Image (tube, grey):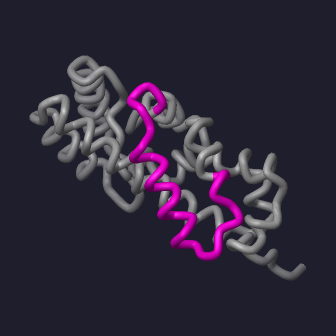
Amino acid sequence: MPAQPALGLGGFNQLTDRQRMNLLFGVCSSTIWARRVLAGAPFRTVDALLDRADRVLAELPDAEIDAALDGHPRIGARPDNPASAREQAAVQVAQDDVKAALAVKNREYEAKFGYVYLVCASGRSAEELLAILTERLDNDPETERRVMRSELAKINRLRLERLLAEPVAQAGSSA
């Protein structure tokens, strides 16, 4: 059986608005973000899509950023979606003491900042994610909010790039 071709930008642009909205919502759980990104379609280049995604995210109010965070489980917790599971794969095989330290630091972070610790976890070990978390606990709330938004933008970009690279059937079923 031949391999399915990647969705690609052309395939993405050919989908219905509803299908594209569904896929974008799988990238970021803010419906406002997904709608506003979709409003820029069709996209002439992948960079145009990524730039639009970044601009829309930068303009979102904090309340909508909080909605976007709802789509991200705690680092070290059982991932509740395929994207998070793939991104946090290294954490799932970490030593129990590292997982326990992540759980403690996650609670400390949430108590201090009021939202889940968000970091672009792809390709990072559990120990590295714990070190980043520990370091970010020293941030003041305003600095941390900027850092978190930056990490969310990285995650959204990574997920958009992966979405376009996935086979058509897989991209359609991951939303």
Name the main secondary structure of what is drawn in magenta: helix
Q: Position of residue 51 (x, y in %)?
A: 48, 63
Residue at 68% of width from left, 72% of height from top? 9
**Residue 32 falls left or right of residue 135:** right
Q: Position of residue 104 (x, y in %)?
A: 25, 25
Residue at 74% of width from left, 65% of height from top? 12
Residue at 32% of width from left, 34% of height from top? 117
Residue situated furthest bottom in the rendering: 2
Asked if the stretch drawn in magenta spans residue 92, the answer is no
Q: Nearer the viewer, residue 116 or 18?
A: 18
Q: Which residues are magenta?
A: 38-64
Please, is residue 142 above or below residue 3 in the view? above
Please, is residue 106 above or below residue 156 in the view? above
Residue situated furthest right in the rendering: 1
**Residue 70 falls left or right of residue 149:** right
Residue at 22% of width from left, 40% of height from top? 133
Q: Nearer the viewer, residue 94 or 88?
A: 88
- Quadrant in which the N terminus appears: bottom right
